[in-house]
Image (tube, rainbow, N blue to C red):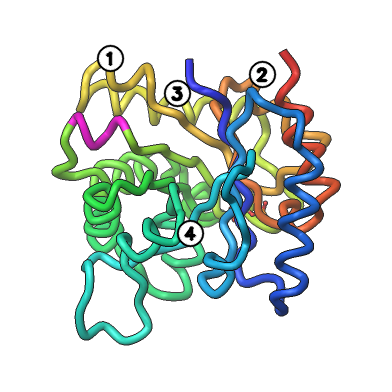
Amino acid sequence: MNKLLIIGNWKCNPITLQEAKKLFNLVKRGIRNIENVETVICPPFPYLSIVNCQMSNVKLGAQDCFWEEKGAFTGEASPSMLKNLGCQYVILGHSERRRYFNETDEMINKKIKTALIAKLKPIFCIGETQKQRDKGESSNILKSQLEKGILGISKKGMKNVTIAYEPVWAIGTGKPCDINTAQTMGLLIRKIITRIFGYSISKKLPILYGGSLNSKNAASYIFEANFQGLLVGGASLNPQEFSKIVKEVSRD
Ligand code: PGA
């Protein structure tokens, strides 16, 4: 089995380069002896080339990318650019991108495909809103986002994809998804992937949980709900708390 994967998504923080460097270095130091967890930090674009991942136990990821390699697309960053800066991962389809920037399943699908061509590993986020949950639509939403997002991806490509279950109502709210519900959704994701790609691909697919994680609840999602990793937002901006999360899940 692969190492557990812990992703820190800094979102649009911090405001200065100095703070970014400090945060990154404190995380590096905080987890320096941990070898059985793959830890990835996803800073905003302007800091990607400045935080130093070389010879480090912390890997670099981006929070988004465009679906074209280059050209007249003002404001965009392509997967190859990110790869050339040392990124190994890219978060795609985050609910904040869907909500504030009107990203559709089709756009996310194009991004996943281009990221794979550039040899970036997509962390593909899916999850239902509170309204959809209240209407009993959670499973259908998950199925639809998943199927549309990976449409046309080969078995070989799928080996480099990670899926993150992030219920929108649990993101940044301090109300994490309860363990049983999260586990059920994780199983549903794996079932859909098995149906489309077969068991040999599905059994190796890392599925992450994200939404109001902290050092107290993190381990349960791994050891009780059987997720292969975590996508951490707010808590990744606190180096002590983030390092503690990594340490909690690294226990054998
Ligand atoms: P949160 O964010 O940990 O602050 O809830 C998670 C995410 O958006 O990935």
Q: Which residue is mark 4?
A: 62
SS at mark 1 in the image: helix
Label 1: few (<14), some (14–19) or many (≥20) C-alpha neighbours in 10 Å: some
Q: Which residue is mark 1?
A: 199
Mark nearest the camera among 4 and 1 is 4
Q: Is residue 156 magenta?
A: yes
Whole-Å distance between the Cαs marked 3 and 2? 13 Å
Looking at the picture, which amino acid does disc 4 mark? Ala
State which region is magenta: 155-159
Q: Identify the mark nearer the N-term, 4 or 3.
A: 4
Q: Which residue is mark 2?
A: 224
Label 3: few (<14), some (14–19) or many (≥20) C-alpha neighbours in 10 Å: some
71 over 183 or under it: above or below: below
SS at mark 4 in the image: strand
Q: Identify the mark nearer the N-term, 3 or 1.
A: 3
Q: Identify the mark nearer the N-term, 2 or 1.
A: 1
SS at mark 3 in the image: helix
Q: Nearer the viewer, residue 220 or 28?
A: 28
- Mark 4 and mark 1 residues within 8 Å of each other at the beta carbon: no
